[in-house]
Amino acid sequence: MPSSRTPKRPPTSPARATPKLRLAPGDRERQILEGAIAYFSEVGFSGQTRELAKRLGITQPLLYRYFPNKQALVERVYQTVFEGRWNPSWIPLLQDRSTPLRERLVEFYRQYAAATYRPEWIRIYMYAGLSDPVLNRRYIQLVRKQLMPVYCREVRHACGLPDSDTEVVEEEIEFVWNLHGGVFYMAMREHVYKTKINVDFLTQVGFAVDNFLAGARTIYPQLLARFAPEALGRPPVPRAAARR
């Protein structure tokens, strides 16, 4: 009589764990850097490398094999997100007087926004200002040294003022920075405050540039006469007297 018992199956060997993908050193470094940019833009620079490593699915010692400490990783993030997106061709764009200044400024901000006004750039910039303002100061100095003097000289020219090589003064830079800071705030509204904006970015930039240039035609000659008369071919005025 046949047995009713179910025949025993031969024992199976335990399933082997799928080995983790081993990345080439360059790919691993890129993975860590890209993950760090996303992580710090979400939590700020107070975020811990232990949590970053966990998110990346790697160990903290492996992370430190590529970046010896957190500061080295933060520095690399800064170089990638800020210095790495700076485009030297923006300077000759602004200096090309074959095109009206309004068109140059609108095109500059179109390119500048495409390179920098991204969610991770804006958020990292804001977090850096709260936790490590040295990074912000370095970027501001880059803008101030490379961009602002060119900007001011082009505004002088557009206002019909003498095209001299006299030094750009702080008051000029602050005047121009009002436009630059206003355009930056447009990106803040979108990427930090999550404000729904029903006017496209370039239209907003056009408004800001038109407003700025209309004011500059009246104010800029007065500004130079008071703070940089030598740019107008006049004798210099002592700084203390100019600020009264």
Image (tube, rainbow, N blue to C red):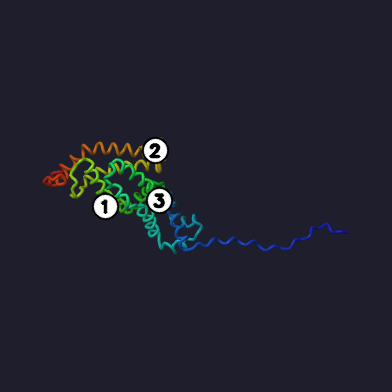
Q: Which mark is residue 200?
A: 2
* Count of numbered tags: 3
Tell which residue pokes out farthest to the right in this image. Answer: 1
Residue, disc 1: 145
Does 56 sit above or below residue 195?
Answer: below
Q: Amino acid at mark 1?
A: Lys
Which mark is first along the chain, 1 or 2? 1
Discs 2/3, front: 2
Q: Amino acid at mark 2?
A: Asp
Q: Secondary structure at mark 3?
A: loop
Q: Which mark is residue 44?
A: 3
Tell which residue pokes out farthest to the top in this image. Answer: 198
Left or right side of 189 for 212: left
Nearer to us in this view, 236 or 185: 236
Q: Secondary structure at mark 1?
A: helix
Nearer to us in this view, 111 or 17: 111
Q: Residue at x 16, y 46 (%)?
A: 231
